[in-house]
Image (spheres, rainbow, N blue to C red):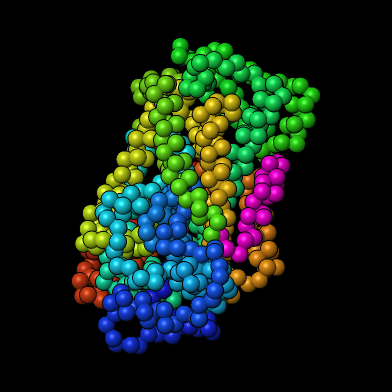
């Protein structure tokens, strides 16, 4: 997991929704710019406790990516000080446009109706310094924003490309995303008209209206992909959590607990049958003397009458995604999403728990890798031709381009932005490489058994897996309304000119969002498929195309553009186009 601020040299007319160019020639310091902005605000309204302060943040990433978080990265939340914060998957942070611009007496933004087609970030009454974060805080804000539930899919990504090919893609995609992100910062430094300029504004100023619309439209694509991924993951986590509770209450669980159950548990391989179903087949790795045989579930589930009845009414492929509507629908219809930002620290804890979970399980398994004997169960080729699935997923896993300006502008020492951004990307790349390779190398079954959601490789009754699913479910329940709110706000702002069209239109829009999510969760519940296509589509625009075009136009305006530079940089969008096309020729 994204348009961020929607500002450039134009200033919004809050009363009419029109915009006009600021023709003042007066030099702007941050303080008098703040005063100028405040002079355009409507009279302050009283009351309101549901405001957004300057430190209100939450991770919206796809494992997502990371995605989100923060992979579709579900993410962690680390305050970067400007209302953008982290975690992933997916990496979606939209606090620069959280609603309403009316201020109460305490300096909080309240939930009054907005009529402006643009979004204004919260500016403290004390007119703070432009850069207020140390380099360390900035580095970990970027790291935390990018990281997220993408960790769930990184081992699967290595399986799709092979160990060698996967690690090369992790390094290569990380380097490419670092370069294009840095180009956005460079263009902003040269052409950003004021403190509030963001990527869509740079696109409008240097490329034209079409580029601005393209940037905003693909922000909607990323957000839509994020909520679909979140719904699939929430359905999965809810299903297994309730299934575990049911088995414990009814006593039908085949498990016999002992003191080794916390770590030494059997793993599962989902074998595809001729009917297209994917039954769970618990498997004991061989040889695996550290695995307790008493923990192995039977190959066929118990068939007690209450169990069969329960399975009919509690099925992941049919009704659980629908049951989830009862939980999420009420949470999506709040006029203000402020309450959910109070849980921003959960994202960071989720990422840390996933790291510990993977390291603990992998250390218990040991090394299970053979790169020479093709007949070995643990054979792993260095390279596999299905690698585009990995490159598409990584495009989302490294995605931060739409809000990188918001994060880096808070760095106290702007001259260190390049260094700090590079360190952050190195940390992300190393984290992905270590977690992915450690799980991949130690996985005790055939590598083709690795799931796009690695938690699916573990039994529902494994204590550490139970905790991971419950933790992630609660995190996504608090993140989903925020992402849905941002999606609805951006859509309404682009189409209608304001973010709150009324209760009935909001209910209808949310109903459409929920319907799309439920349909995907029932008919295409493929976490890996959705994140790789979302990453390839959004990456083509935000990673491979817009940064390159902005950089080339910037060089042209400076009189520094050469043919060699043009040719080399135009290769980047070609790579992005090939990456998107290749997604249609590989399978999960």
Residue 169 percent location from the top left of the image: 35, 43
Count the marks: 0
> Which residue is at a point 33% across and 87% down the rendered structure image?
24
Give how far across and how far down residue 90 sits, in percent.
Answer: 46, 50
In this orientation, does residue 279 appear?
yes
Residue 319 within the segment the image draws in magenta: yes
Question: Is 320 placed above or below 125 here?
Answer: above
The residue lying at 36 percent from left, 70 percent from top is 126
Task: Please provide percent x and percent y for residue 139.
Answer: 30, 51
Location of residue 327 with respect to 290 vertically, above or below: below
Location of residue 510 (image quadrant): bottom right
Residue displayed at 35% across by 52% down: 142
State the predominant SS element of the stretch in magenta.
Answer: helix
Magenta stretch encompasses residue 400? no
Residue 193 can be seen, yes or no: no
Q: Residue at x 41, y 79 (%)?
A: 38
Q: Position of residue 65 (x, y in %)?
A: 45, 47
Observer-nearest residue: 159 or 348?
348
Q: Is residue 505 left or right of residue 359?
A: right
In the rendered structure, which segment of residues is drawn in magenta?
318-337
């Amino acid at each position: 997991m994204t348009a961020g601020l929607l500002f450039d040299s134009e200033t919004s007319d809050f009363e009419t929704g029109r915009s006009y160019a600021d023709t003042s020639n007066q030099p702007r310091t941050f303080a008098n710019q703040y005063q100028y902005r405040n002079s355009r605000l409507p009279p302050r309204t009283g009351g309101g406790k549901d405001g957004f302060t300057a430190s209100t943040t939450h991770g919206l990433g796809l494992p997502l990516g990371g995605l989100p978080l923060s992979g579709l990265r579900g993410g962690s939340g680390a305050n970067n000080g400007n209302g953008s914060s982290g975690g992933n998957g997916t990496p979606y942070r939209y606090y620069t446009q959280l609603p309403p611009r009316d201020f109460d007496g305490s300096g909080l933004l309240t939930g009054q109706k907005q009529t402006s087609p643009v979004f204004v970030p919260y500016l403290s009454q004390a007119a703070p310094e432009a850069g207020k974060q140390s380099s360390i805080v900035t580095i970990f804000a970027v790291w935390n924003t990018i990281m997220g539930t993408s960790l769930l899919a990184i081992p699967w990504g290595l399986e799709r490309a092979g160990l060698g090919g996967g690690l090369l893609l992790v390094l290569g995609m990380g380097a490419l995303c670092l370069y294009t992100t840095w180009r956005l910062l460079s263009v902003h430094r040269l052409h950003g008209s004021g403190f509030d300029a963001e990527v869509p504004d740079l696109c409008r100023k240097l490329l034209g209206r079409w580029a601005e619309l393209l940037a905003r439209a693909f922000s909607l694509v990323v957000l839509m992909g994020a909520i679909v991924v979140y719904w699939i993951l929430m359905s999965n986590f809810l299903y297994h959590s309730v299934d575990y509770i049911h088995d414990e209450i009814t006593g039908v669980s085949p498990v016999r607990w002992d003191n080794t159950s916390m770590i030494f548990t059997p793993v599962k391989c989902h074998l595809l049958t001729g009917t297209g179903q994917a039954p769970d087949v618990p498997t004991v790795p061989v040889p695996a003397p550290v695995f307790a045989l008493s923990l192995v579930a039977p190959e066929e589930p118990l068939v007690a009458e209450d169990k069969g009845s329960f399975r009919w009414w509690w099925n992941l492929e049919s009704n659980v995604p629908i049951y989830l509507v009862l939980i999420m629908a009420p949470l999506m219809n709040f006029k203000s999403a402020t309450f959910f930002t109070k849980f921003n620290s959960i994202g960071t804890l989720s990422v840390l728990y996933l790291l510990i979970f993977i390291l603990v399980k992998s250390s218990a398994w040991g090394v299970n890798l053979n790169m020479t004997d093709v007949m070995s169960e643990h054979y792993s080729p260095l390279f596999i031709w299905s690698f585009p699935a990995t490159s598409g997923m990584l495009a989302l896993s490294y995605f931060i381009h739409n809000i990188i300006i918001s994060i880096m502008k808070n760095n106290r020492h702007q001259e260190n932005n390049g260094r700090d951004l590079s360190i952050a990307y190195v940390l992300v790349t190393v984290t992905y490489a270590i977690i992915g390779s450690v799980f991949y190398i130690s996985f005790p079954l055939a590598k083709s058994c690795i799931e796009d959601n690695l938690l699916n490789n573990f039994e529902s009754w494994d204590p550490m897996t139970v905790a991971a699913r419950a933790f992630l479910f609660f995190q996504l329940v608090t993140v989903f309304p925020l992402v849905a709110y941002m999606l609805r706000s951006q859509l309404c702002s682009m189409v209608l000119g304001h973010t709150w069209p009324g209760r009935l239109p909001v209910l209808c829009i949310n109903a459409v969002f929920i319907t799309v999510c439920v349909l995907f969760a029932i008919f295409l519940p493929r976490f890996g498929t959705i994140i790789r296509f979302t990453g390839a589509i959004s990456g083509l625009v935000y990673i491979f195309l817009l940064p390159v075009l902005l950089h080339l136009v910037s060089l042209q305006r400076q009189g520094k553009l050469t043919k060699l530079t043009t040719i080399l940089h135009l290769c980047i969008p070609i790579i992005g186009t090939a990456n998107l096309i290749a997604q249609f020729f590989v399978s999960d």
